[in-house]
């Protein structure tokens, strides 16, 4: 067994894990999070996507021991003070989810996508979501939701910049 | 109307695209799926599946596995038998000419498909359960396997079930063969083709699983599982497990997609329940994706021959279809329907076809059982007919759109009885196709196609028109499927139930027997109620039939019935609630009941709108019961059972425009237009979402997906690495629009929309690609249209020239 | 979904890795870099090593260096850092282009270039780019360092010239010079996005004629290979679109269709057809780029 320390959604945890334990199992079983979901075992579906030190990663393809001393953010950490993140809002408005199983991973990948490219076009969004499978929505409303969230976030950022200039 | 009032209408009105009630929890990681359920003292089960497709089991040795630290037990068929478990999965829907065959939850002496559960092991930790699983030693004697259903019919084919002659699980036919023979003899021309409607793996994103708890004192067995029809699961589990039905409770948490695959009865959930009983510990089982590939019952898998007789002027005279289905090694609990009762009733599709005959046989094969998957039977039916329509148009040198228009059932002909005995309730097929053709500017497209061919570019236009049946009905039809037999697996009909309770606050709790898993019924059901009762959607809580001891009985969410049947049942209860509240209001207003009108949540005296009683006030009074009519019981609640006279018959008109890069065999869908008619739409945004998702599953079948087995019955596409579930960048934007012909017999005028998207794209796309490749003389291509399919066809065409 | 148990070590230095490898010489040992090839196999128990050595913290071999005429990739450089480097796109175009098409963003965030090369998956993208780029692969053993030319490195499916107990540490890639150009194009496998066929090329030109060329392919054979007849057909030919077309005709000169990969993703016949087509497309892009760059220079 190995002792690890990690920060998850701002809270620090000390866990004792078997080296073979996958990060997603540690998050679900040891920490009790419900957001990251397991949809495949071949690292293709992306339902378990979390941010590890700021980068989107499939938590089923990372050992918990590898997450020692890292900062993890899951979909639970997207919401701040009970306020939905613009992506979460847009997914709701655009009907970007049906069964909801892929949604936590989809949101976390989309979040990184928007951090890297604040104004992606539809093709870029589709490419950017290559690592996340959805069997319900046909992706169209997910793409619309990401596009709409990008607009909301750029308005928020521009607003901030204007204030700063003043 | 004040703006506040307008706002309120916007929020609740039937037909508005409001946000879903389900979403806040699902968007924030607060949804609860099977793997999120944790119980004190919970242990984990892993299933060992057969690596062989056909083998005799000589011996199973579980000693080493059981000796492992952390392992509680390992069980095989012998343990089930010793515990007195009947253990055989029955067939729910049946046709008269059908063989009984073994379908044990754990292999008994023999395995008949790769993936068949052979043993289970239970451990303190899921990792240990999987370690121990590897230590179970099984002595298999492999037998010759047969995977192809046509091969399975041959006299020298291996026998799968000793008591089933020639591997034939069932045969079925419908229609008038004499009339068809006559039509074919008389008609000017006939066209025909044979094609494989390939096997598909459902791949709901959440794999199946269960958490079972047993109380050894009360003998209550609670099974949490993903289910589309928990009451069916409860009833069958009672029989398979030999446990009293009154002591089984099925609880359904959030479900991560199903598409039919969570409506069948499977071994895994039963075994989880068995282990919980044996060990007196909560047991969790969550299947891995690779396990799901070999255990979630698969879709399609039929070899279909179709022939169409037409006259020179484009009049259709007759249709003949024969299918041979490879139903797998065990007959699924719902294995009969796809090649029979969901296939044939749609064969007339949107056309007047005077004579139709259909023959079907289900063959046992050494593959995973097949069962309903989104589009069940209807996708096969539409593909067959719509491909024949394209082939006939080509044969007659007619434009394929014009050929269809000539043969459409006219809108004034409804209700329309087809040559296979279906009664279409309503439709306007011409309007649907016209709308689709207008959207793509069909005439201009044909010109562009001709121009591009000059440049060596191959554009193709394909049409897929179809009809789908939703909400199985009437109850009398249950007899036909053997559901009313004394020894039926589930003795039932297909009506739906609902209860609506208006609280003294005016808030509403509504119970409905559906069991949605992504369809958004918590929202659409609430809209139906909000609209009828004049309350806000936020004030309506929906409790579906997802807890068999704490929810009303229901048939569940299968077969396009959630909105039409659930909505229908709720609308009936809402009317009953209004009737009772009206009497209370009349009493309070001191007028006759007939003089009280109800609108937007308020009762008022006809002609004197100043004086009114709100629904909330009536509800309040119903509980106080101090000022209600003398003969009235307190409370404001009503229950209804909705048993419709007919199914709903939705339709769609899809058009695909593709360009084929003949150098690399690549198909680019330039545009995809889906015009659907699902009657009145409760929430257009949700309807659109259903179409998007269905269309992408249809595109998946057309272009990418196939469960490929080798000759020995090994599944070669055993993970997402080999089986392409479409990704965002692999599918086009879909232009969705609709026509509306309300169902005349449904209380809310709604028809189903779940299947449609997964039915129309396959013929539209194959028709488009064969249209594009017409200059090469390519008439037909088998799905999926992979790089191999396209390049090989082009190569063969070149050789032929 | 549940790897078998293993002993886990996290190494802090290359030396420690090599010592651990030697200490566990009798056991099945795997190195854990990005883990996106290894962990999926371990989850499905297709691989169950006794010992796993986590090399993610070997800071010495992480990052991209530039030295004279070459770019030096530390073996543990993540794909994302390669794709994000404008300089790599300019100096080592096929490497950047191939790396950008690997997997998906999550995979590119975790996966490493050295892990990829050492794995030698026939359907992976970087090997052809590395081979076409005439890279030198540096590996370290307990008895010292050695360089292996890319031509000698890729041996077989999942097999390279790396010896047991050697660690791949760096990849040295010669930079494109003035008038040179490179490209990588591929036909993806629909399920994984890996290369059904991927063609990488580098053209060395004087702005008017091709002086020499290297063309390598993924997905066609059990490991990445060069297409020498195509390279020869390009040499000393004018830098123009027609050259690409006619050179691509030589793709299967010394490749029998029967030697090509034949699996559920595509038959060898389809691969032969795709190989010819994608070789032509890769060369056409490279010719265009070379013409553009020589125009830009003048």
Image: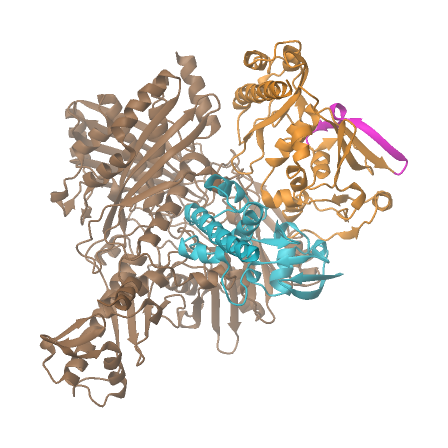
Judged left or right of residue C216, residue C142 is: right
Q: Is residue B611 magenta?
A: no
**Which residue is more in the foreground, B281 or B737?**
B737
**Which residue is more in the foreground, C194 or B54?**
C194
Q: Is residue C144 magenta?
A: yes
Read off the magenta span.
C142-157
In the image, residue C260 above or below residue B72: above
In the image, residue B436 above or below residue B60: above
**Which residue is more in the foreground, C61 or B355?**
C61
Residue B494 appears in the picture as rendered:
no
Q: State which quarter of the image contains the N terminus of chain B.
A: bottom left
Q: Quadrant of residue C75?
A: top right
Question: Outermost residue, bottom direction?
Answer: B626
Residue B603 appears in the picture as rendered:
yes
Question: Outermost residue, front direction?
Answer: A166
In the image, residue B312 above or below residue B43: above
Judged left or right of residue A6, residue A119 is: left
Colour-to-chain, orange:
C
Pinpoint residue B447: horizontal percent, then vertical percent: 28, 23
Colour-to-chain, brown:
B
**Which residue is more in the foreground, B537 or B751?**
B537
Numbered-mark total: 0
Q: Quadrant of residue B392?
A: top left
**Residue sitting at x 22%, y 90%:** B626
Colour-to-chain, cyan:
A
Judged left or right of residue B426, residue C269 is: right
Pinpoint residue B669: horizontal percent, then vertical percent: 40, 33
Pinpoint residue B510: horizontal percent, then vertical percent: 32, 70
Pinpoint residue C109: horizontal percent, then vertical percent: 64, 45
């Amino acid at each position: 067994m190995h002792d690890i320390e990690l920060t998850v959604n701002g809270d620090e945890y000390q866990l004792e894990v078997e080296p073979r334990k996958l990060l997603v199992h540690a998050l679900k079983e040891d920490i009790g999070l419900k957001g990251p979901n397991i949809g495949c075992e071949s690292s293709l579906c992306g339902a378990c996507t979390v941010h590890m030190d700021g980068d989107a990663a499939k938590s089923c393809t990372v050992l918990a021991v590898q997450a020692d001393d890292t900062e993890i953010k899951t979909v639970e950490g997207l919401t701040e003070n009970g306020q939905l993140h613009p992506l979460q809002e847009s997914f709701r408005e655009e009907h970007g989810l049906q069964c909801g199983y892929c949604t936590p991973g989809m949101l976390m990948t989309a979040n990184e996508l928007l951090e890297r490219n604040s104004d992606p076009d539809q093709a870029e969004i589709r490419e950017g979501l290559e690592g996340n499978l959805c069997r319900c929505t046909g992706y169209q409303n997910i793409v619309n939701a990401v596009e709409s969230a990008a607009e909301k976030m750029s308005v928020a950022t521009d607003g901030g910049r204007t204030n700063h200039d003043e | 109307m004040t703006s506040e009032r307008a706002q309120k209408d916007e929020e609740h009105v039937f037909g508005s695209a409001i946000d879903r009630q389900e979403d806040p929890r699902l968007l924030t990681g607060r949804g609860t799926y099977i793997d999120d359920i944790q119980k004190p003292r919970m242990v984990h089960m892993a299933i060992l599946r057969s690596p062989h497709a056909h083998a005799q089991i000589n011996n199973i040795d579980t000693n080493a596995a059981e000796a492992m630290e952390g392992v509680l037990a390992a069980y095989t068929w012998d343990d089930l038998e010793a515990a007195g478990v009947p253990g055989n999965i029955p067939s729910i829907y049946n046709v008269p000419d059908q063989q009984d065959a073994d379908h044990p939850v754990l292999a008994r002496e023999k395995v008949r498909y790769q993936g068949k559960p052979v043993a289970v092991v239970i451990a303190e930790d899921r990792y240990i359960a999987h370690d121990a699983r590897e230590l179970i030693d099984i002595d298999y004697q492999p037998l010759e396997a047969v995977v192809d259903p046509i091969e399975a019919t041959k006299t020298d084919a291996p026998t799968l079930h000793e008591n089933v002659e020639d591997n034939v699980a069932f045969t079925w036919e419908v229609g008038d063969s004499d009339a068809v023979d006559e039509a074919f003899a008389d008609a000017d021309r006939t066209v025909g083709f044979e094609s494989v409607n390939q096997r598909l793996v459902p791949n709901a994103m959440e794999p199946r699983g269960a958490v079972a708890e047993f109380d050894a004192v009360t003998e209550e067995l609670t099974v949490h599982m993903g289910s589309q029809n928990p009451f069916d699961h409860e009833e069958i589990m009672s029989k398979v497990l030999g446990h009293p039905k009154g002591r089984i409770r099925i609880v359904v948490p959030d479900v991560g997609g199903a598409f039919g695959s969570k409506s069948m009865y499977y071994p895994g959930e039963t075994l989880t329940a068995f282990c919980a009983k044996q060990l007196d510990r909560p047991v969790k089982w969550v299947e891995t994706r690779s396990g799901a590939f070999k255990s979630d019952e698969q879709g399609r898998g039929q070899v279909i021959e179709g022939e169409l007789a037409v006259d020179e002027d484009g009049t259709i005279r007759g249709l003949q279809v024969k299918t041979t289905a490879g139903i797998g090694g065990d007959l699924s609990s719902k294995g009969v329907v796809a090649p029979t009762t969901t296939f044939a009733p749609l064969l007339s599709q949107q056309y007047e076809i005077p004579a139709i005959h259909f023959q079907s046989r289900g063959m046992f094969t050494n593959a995973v059982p097949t069962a309903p998957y989104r589009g069940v039977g209807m996708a096969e039916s539409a593909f067959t007919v719509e491909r024949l329509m394209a082939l006939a148009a080509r044969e007659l040198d007619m434009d394929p759109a014009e050929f269809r228009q000539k043969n459409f059932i006219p809108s004034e002909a409804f209700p329309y009885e087809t040559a296979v005995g279906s009664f279409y309730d309503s439709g306007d097929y011409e309007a649907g196709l016209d709308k689709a053709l207008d959207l793509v500017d069909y005439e201009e497209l044909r010109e562009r196609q001709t121009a591009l061919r000059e440049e060596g570019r191959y554009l193709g236009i394909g049409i897929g028109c179809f009809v789908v049946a939703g909400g199985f009905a009437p109850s009398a039809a249950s007899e036909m499927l053997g559901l009313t037999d004394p020894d039926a697996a589930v003795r039932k009909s297909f009506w739906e139930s609902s209860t609506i309770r208006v609280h003294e606050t005016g808030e509403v709790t509504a119970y409905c027997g559906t069991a949605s898993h992504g369809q958004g019924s918590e929202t659409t059901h609430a809209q139906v109620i909000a609209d009828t009762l004049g309350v806000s959607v936020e004030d309506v809580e929906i409790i579906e039939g997802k807890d068999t001891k704490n929810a009303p009985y229901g048939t569940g969410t299968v077969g396009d019935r959630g909105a039409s049947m659930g909505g229908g049942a709720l609308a009936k209860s809402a009317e009953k609630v209004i009737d009772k509240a009206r009497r209370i209001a009349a009493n309070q207003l001191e007028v006759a009941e007939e003089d009280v009108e109800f609108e937007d949540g308020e009762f008022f005296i006809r002609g004197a709108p100043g004086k009114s009683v709100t629904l909330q006030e009536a509800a309040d009074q119903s509980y106080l019961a101090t000022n209600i009519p003398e003969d009235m019981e307190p409370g404001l609640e009503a229950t209804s059972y909705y048993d419709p006279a007919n199914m709903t018959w939705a339709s769609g008109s899809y058009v695909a425009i593709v360009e084929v890069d003949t150098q690399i065999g690549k198909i680019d869908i330039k545009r995809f237009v889906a015009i659907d008619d699902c009657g009145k739409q409760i929430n257009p945004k949700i309807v659109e979402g259903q179409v998007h998702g269905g269309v992408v599953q249809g595109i998946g079948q057309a272009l990418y997906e196939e469960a490929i087995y080798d000759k020995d019955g090994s599944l070669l596409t055993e993970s997402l690495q080999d089986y392409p579930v479409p990704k965002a960048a692999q599918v086009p934007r879909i232009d969705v629009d609709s026509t509306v012909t309300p169902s005349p017999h449904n209380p809310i005028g709604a028809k189903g929309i779940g299947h449609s998207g997964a039915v129309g794209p396959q013929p539209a796309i194959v028709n488009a690609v064969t249209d594009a490749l017409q200059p090469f003389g390519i008439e037909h291509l088998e799905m999926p249209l992979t790089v191999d399919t396209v390049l090989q066809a082009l190569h063969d065409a070149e050789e032929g020239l | 979904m549940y790897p078998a148990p293993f002993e886990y070590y996290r190494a802090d230095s290359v030396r420690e890795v090599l010592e651990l490898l030697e200490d566990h010489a009798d056991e099945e040992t795997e190195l854990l870099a990005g883990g996106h090839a290894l962990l999926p196999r371990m989850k499905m128990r297709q691989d169950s090593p006794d010992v796993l050595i986590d090399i993610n913290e070997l800071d010495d071999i992480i990052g991209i260096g530039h030295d004279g005429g070459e770019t030096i990739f530390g073996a543990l450089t993540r794909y994302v850092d390669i794709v994000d480097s404008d300089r790599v796109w300019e100096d080592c175009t096929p490497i950047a282009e191939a790396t950008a098409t690997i997997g998906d963003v999550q995979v590119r965030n975790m996966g490493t270039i050295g892990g990829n090369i050492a794995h030698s998956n026939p359907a992976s993208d970087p090997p052809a780019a590395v081979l076409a780029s005439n890279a030198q692969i540096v590996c370290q053993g307990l008895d010292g360092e050695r360089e292996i030319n890319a031509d000698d490195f890729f041996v077989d499916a999942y097999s390279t010239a790396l010896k047991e107990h050697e660690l791949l540490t760096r990849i040295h890639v010669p930079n494109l010079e003035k008038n040179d150009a490179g490209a990588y194009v591929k036909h993806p496998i629909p399920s994984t996005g890996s290369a059904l066929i991927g063609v990488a090329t580098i053209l060395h030109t004087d702005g008017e004629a091709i002086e020499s060329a290297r063309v390598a392919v993924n997905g066609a054979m059990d490991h990445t290979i060069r297409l020498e007849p195509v390279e020869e057909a390009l040499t000393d030919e004018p830098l123009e679109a027609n050259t690409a077309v006619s050179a691509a005709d030589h793709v299967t000169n010394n490749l029998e269709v029967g030697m090509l990969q034949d699996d559920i993703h595509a038959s060898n016949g389809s691969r032969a057809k795709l190989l010819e087509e994608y070789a032509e497309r890769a060369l056409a892009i490279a010719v265009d780029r070379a013409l553009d760059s020589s125009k830009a220079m003048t």
